């Protein structure tokens, strides 16, 4: 009996504690909800209001609000975010990206090959201080080079021939076409002059050509040229030419061309045709001559039978390559009368054969352009006189035959002509007593 009463009392106490706890929590929730959602109001309570009435009113309001709205719970912690994965550790000594083995890092400790292309190729030469490689490493270090860039062909400069240009020497030729004289051509060494601004001496060359005979009745063509060449090497310095045409219609009536050589390999051409003018700069091979100096170069050659040489000539704006082959001493049956009068025997002649080809700046023949043949006969005595020149052109064969030759002026040196001999100084009497 007593045990049952004790158990009942214990249950009642537990129920009362639970009710009290629920009432306190409900009142706290009501106060929180009213403070957050209901705007504050000012109420004047009577002076005789008691705390019991106020608590009852708050409990009723909390119960009503709880029945109308649900309780919101705001979490105090944010959801867990997984940290980003760490990047994988790359092996030392390799590129950051891409992860591809490009072969830049050798594993056998051998010397690394060059990655950039070489600017020059030297076959069969090892770098100093490094041992030659064999096998795959050697192939990587010295790969085969296929050079596809176009460059000027390396060729030696022609030997100097300025000593053969003697002032006062002059040549005159008849131009014969089809067995008939059609024109006259002249060339000569005018003078030797000091260079500008203290530069080395230079030699002035002059040449001219004009039509005559039956051809002059149809058209008149006059061509004048003057050139300065180096007195030692014979390389052209400056060239000027004037072409005048009358009669048959053509592309122009008057043409003036001035060519300035800024060292071998670079030239500036000022060309004026009637009223049209143009200036162009070109890169040329180093062994390029003008029309007058290239004939002086051919005259100075002394080739053995079968020996070959070549040079380039600039005719106006056209670049030509002249290949010369020596034929050795021959008997010249077509000796001109002036040659006989100069004492040149028919067997004292050396023959050259050449080919004239129109080329580009790299020395390659231009497709579609015809190559012309040329033959030159030069005396083998010390004067080296060009007796005849023969060349085929697109409408036939043109032949130049010597008709007049003026020897060079007598010179004391290569710089100035000889003057009257200097008078020897008067004899000085020996020292001694004066006779009385």
Image: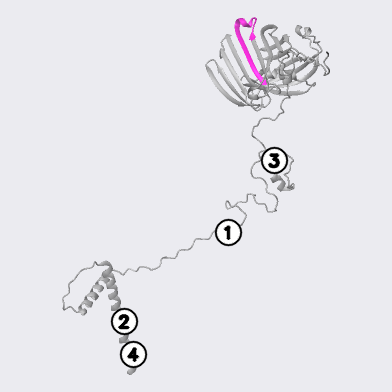
Between the residue at mark 3 and the residue at mark 1, the CA separation in whole angstroms equals 38 Å
* Screen quadrant of the C terminus: top right
Q: Are marks 3 and 2 in contact (CB under 8 Å)?
A: no
Q: Which residues are magenta?
A: 210-229
**Magenta span includes 215:** yes
* Screen quadrant of the N terminus: bottom left
Q: Earlier in the sequence, mark 2 or mark 4?
A: 4
Where does label 4 land, which residue? 7
Vertical relation: 87 (above or below) 48: above
Q: Is residue 226 left or right of residue 68?
A: right
Q: Residue at x 54, y 19 (%)?
A: 277
Where does label 3 land, which residue? 144
Where does label 1 land, which residue? 89
Vertical relation: 3 (above or below) 318: below
Q: Residue at x 31, y 81 (%)?
A: 18
Vertical relation: 344 (above or below) 128: above
């Amino acid at each position: 009996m007593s045990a049952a009463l004790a158990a009942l009392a214990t249950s009642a106490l537990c129920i009362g504690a639970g009710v009290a706890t629920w009432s306190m929590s409900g009142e706290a929730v009501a106060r929180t909800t009213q403070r957050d959602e209901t705007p504050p109001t000012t109420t004047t309570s009577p002076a005789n209001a008691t705390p019991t009435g106020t608590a009852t009113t708050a409990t009723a309001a909390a119960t009503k609000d709880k029945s109308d709205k649900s309780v919101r719970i705001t979490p105090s912690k944010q959801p867990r975010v997984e940290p980003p994965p760490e990047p994988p550790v790359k092996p030392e000594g390799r590129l950051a990206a891409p992860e591809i083995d490009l072969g830049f890092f050798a594993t056998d400790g051998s010397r690394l090959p060059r990655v950039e292309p070489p600017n020059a190729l030297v076959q069969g030469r090892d770098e100093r201080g490094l041992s030659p490689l064999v096998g795959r490493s050697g192939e990587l270090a010295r790969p085969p080079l296929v050079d596809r860039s176009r460059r000027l062909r390396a060729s030696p400069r022609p030997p100097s021939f300025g000593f053969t240009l003697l002032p006062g020497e002059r040549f005159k030729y008849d131009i014969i076409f089809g067995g008939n004289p059609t024109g006259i051509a002249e060339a000569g060494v005018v003078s030797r002059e000091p260079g500008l601004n203290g530069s080395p001496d230079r030699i002035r060359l002059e040449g001219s050509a004009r039509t005559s005979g039956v051809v002059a009745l149809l058209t008149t063509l006059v061509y004048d040229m003057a050139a300065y060449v180096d007195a030692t090497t014979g390389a052209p310095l400056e060239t000027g030419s004037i072409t005048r045409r009358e009669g048959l219609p053509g592309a122009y009536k008057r043409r003036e061309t001035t060519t300035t050589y800024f060292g071998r390999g670079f030239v500036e051409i000022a060309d004026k045709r009637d009223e049209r003018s143009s200036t162009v700069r070109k890169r040329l091979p180093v062994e390029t001559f003008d029309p007058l100096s290239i004939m002086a170069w051919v005259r100075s050659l002394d080739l053995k039978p079968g020996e070959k040489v070549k040079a380039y000539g600039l005719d106006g704006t056209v670049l030509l390559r002249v290949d010369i082959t020596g034929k050795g001493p021959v008997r010249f049956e077509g000796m001109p009368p002036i040659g006989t009068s100069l004492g040149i025997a028919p067997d004292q002649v050396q023959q050259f054969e050449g080919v004239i080809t129109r080329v580009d700046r790299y020395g390659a023949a231009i497709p579609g352009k015809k190559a012309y043949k040329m033959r030159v006969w030069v005396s083998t005595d010390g004067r080296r006189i060009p007796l005849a020149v023969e060349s085929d052109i697109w409408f036939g064969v043109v032949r130049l035959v010597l008709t007049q030759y003026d020897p060079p002026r007598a010179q004391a040196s290569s710089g100035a002509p000889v003057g009257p001999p200097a008078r020897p100084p008067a004899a000085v009497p020996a020292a001694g007593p004066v006779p009385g």
